[in-house]
Amino acid sequence: MPELPEVETVRRAIAPVLEGAHLEQVEIRDARLVRPFDPIIVAGELVGQRVAEVGRRGKYLIVGFESGRALLVHLRMTGSLRHAKRGALADDPHTRAVLRLDNGSDVAYRDVRRFGTWELFEPGELAAYLAPRLGPEPLGPLSAARLGGRLDGRRAPLKSALLDQRTIAGLGNIYVDEALWQSMLHPLRVAGSLDETELARLHRAIRSVLRKGLERQGSTLRDYALPDGAYGTMQDEFRAYGRGGEPCERCGSALVRIVVGGRTTTFCPRCQALPG
Ligand SMILES: [Zn+2]
């Protein structure tokens, strides 16, 4: 599932294509993308809009229009964007929507599992929608103390608290496992129990794994690709995620796989021991 580095990589690639362009034609092939709204009505609302800016909050892409409206795109499991010159996009049964731009480009939204969503917001509505759903950006001016404040008093396992987008925005299973390995914290630690040193380590690790993910243009495991079809290479940097049974690169112990809050979780039982 695309997490912050994957979504931000897509944003950086697609922004120069979309920004300043008018949507000439909009075809929404899959009603599920915009439900409960009628895809024909939504497409009609989008035609003629001019893109002012492509932004991101957490794992959401935000296509902001000059009219003040905004299209909130959530890629969920397998959503991705592709772009090509007009008429040059490959035929693809997983294409759910196509935007034809007045600058000679087509942008396709592709989604194998079809969990992705597009929601159109009227001017001024988006901030109020996102505020209760998303905590601060981990690569923004987030201090270790503020991260500590978000975890304070929480009885949930640390892993679950970090996956909760209201704690901080943008983390998913991959980058949480990587950040916990790097900061040597057990995924089942009580979220509110970290001392100052541990918080500083976690804060540093979260920012470091996300920056590495951005540098490597995200991780391609199944369907994630950049808008030009290229793949990310962060998967080559994984120290914990998906490596159950393999030796820990720090201590050589076999990494262990458990389930936390319904999510497969891989960690080192020695480096990330629970406090006694
Ligand atoms: Zn280890």
Image (cartoon, helix red, strand yellow):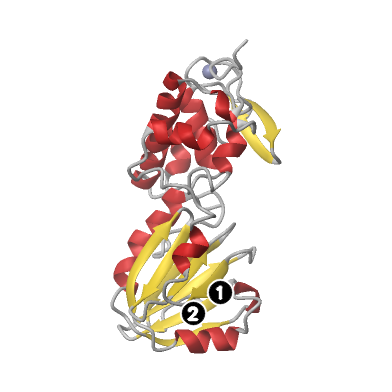
- 219 relative to 40, above or below: above
* Residue 14 shows in the view: no
The alpha-carbon separation of the residues under discs 1 and 2 comes to: 7 Å
Q: Secondary structure at mark 1?
A: strand
Residue 56: percent from left, percent from top: 40, 59
- 193 relative to 51, above or below: above
Q: Are marks 1 and 2 in contact (CB under 8 Å)?
A: yes
Residue 55: percent from left, percent from top: 37, 63
* Residue 158 shows in the view: yes
Q: Secondary structure at mark 2?
A: strand
Going by the image, does 66 lie left or right of 233?
left
Residue type marked 2? Val
Going by the image, does 106 lie left or right of 39?
left
- 212 relative to 25, above or below: above
Q: Which residue is mark 1?
A: 95
- Nearest the eye: 57 or 196: 196
Residue type marked 1? Thr
- Nearest the eye: 97 or 42: 42
- 259 relative to 225, above or below: above
Residue 37: percent from left, percent from top: 62, 80
Q: Which residue is mark 2?
A: 98
